[in-house]
Image: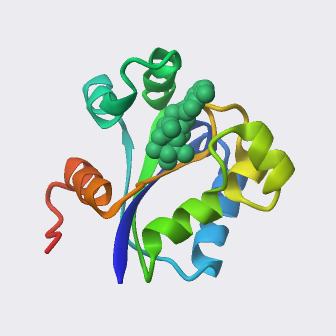
């Protein structure tokens, strides 16, 4: 059993129909949502969370978007949760998601390369770091 951090991004939370669709993807793909919270990610948290992208052209756009409304944060559990959740999300770039993975979450609900519906941790180390950042009360071990 592996854990990963999923974020459902602000444009989805503003649209109950899309949120429901994404939650159905999660449940029907056999992920367990073991913790969830809805929160406004603060600018400080977003800057820390995305510090690896600090020098990229989309960084300001990204942190502005991620603090533009509430997000849902989920700790997902499953065998191979990290890889499987990223596969279910689909490619980062919206044109790729729509053309090459139209049944993926980003293929269905992504609007732009920034507003691409969801986040998923990319390794066991980042999953631990990201879960500890947003769920400090969670006993990871
Ligand atoms: P995530 O980390 O959110 O799961 P990812 O690992 O597929 O996505 P990253 O390269 O880590 O992609 O980018 C982090 C986030 O930055 C993306 O989810 C997206 O919101 C935004 N982003 C990435 N590339 C671009 C881009 N070329 N233009 C605009 N925004 C981008
Ligand atoms: Mg990433």
Figure check: 42 above or below 73: above
Q: Nearer the viewer, residue 3 or 75?
A: 3
Figure check: 10 above or below 81: above
Residue 51: percent from the left, percent from the top? Answer: 31, 29
Residue 9: percent from the left, percent from the top? Answer: 53, 42
Figure check: 36 above or below 115: below
Q: Is residue 9 visible?
A: no
Q: Residue at x 37, y 43 (%)?
A: 39
Instruction: Describe the colour scheme in one phrase.
Output: rainbow
What number of labels is visible? 0
Position of 133 compared to 1: left or right?
left
Q: Residue at x 70, y 62 (%)?
A: 21
Residue 103: percent from the left, percent from the top? Answer: 79, 62
Q: Residue at x 70, y 52 (%)?
A: 18
Q: Quadrant of the N terminus?
A: bottom left
Position of 65 compared to 14: left or right?
left
Position of 104 compared to 23: left or right?
right
Q: Residue at x 26, y 58 (%)?
A: 125
Residue 124: percent from the left, percent from the top? Answer: 31, 63
Q: Is residue 72 visible?
A: yes
Residue found at the very far right of the displayed protein: 99
Position of 71 compared to 36: left or right?
right
Q: Quadrant of the C terminus?
A: bottom left
Q: Nearer the viewer, residue 85 or 108?
A: 85
Q: Which quadrant of the figure has residue 102?
A: bottom right
């Amino acid at each position: 059993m592996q854990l990963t951090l999923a974020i459902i991004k602000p444009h989805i939370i503003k649209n109950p129909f899309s949120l429901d669709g994404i939650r159905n993807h999660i449940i029907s793909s056999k992920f367990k949502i073991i913790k969830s919270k809805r929160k406004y990610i603060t600018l400080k948290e977003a800057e820390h969370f995305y510090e690896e992208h600090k020098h990229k052209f989309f960084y300001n756009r990204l942190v502005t978007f991620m603090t533009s409304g509430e997000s849902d944060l989920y700790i997902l559990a499953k065998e191979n949760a990290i890889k499987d959740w990223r596969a279910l999300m689909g490619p980062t770039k919206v044109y790729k998601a729509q053309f090459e993975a139209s049944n993926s979450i980003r293929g269905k609900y992504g609007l732009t390369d920034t507003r691409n519906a969801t986040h998923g941790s990319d390794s066991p180390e980042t999953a631990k770091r990201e879960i500890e950042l947003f769920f400090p009360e969670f006993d990871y071990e």
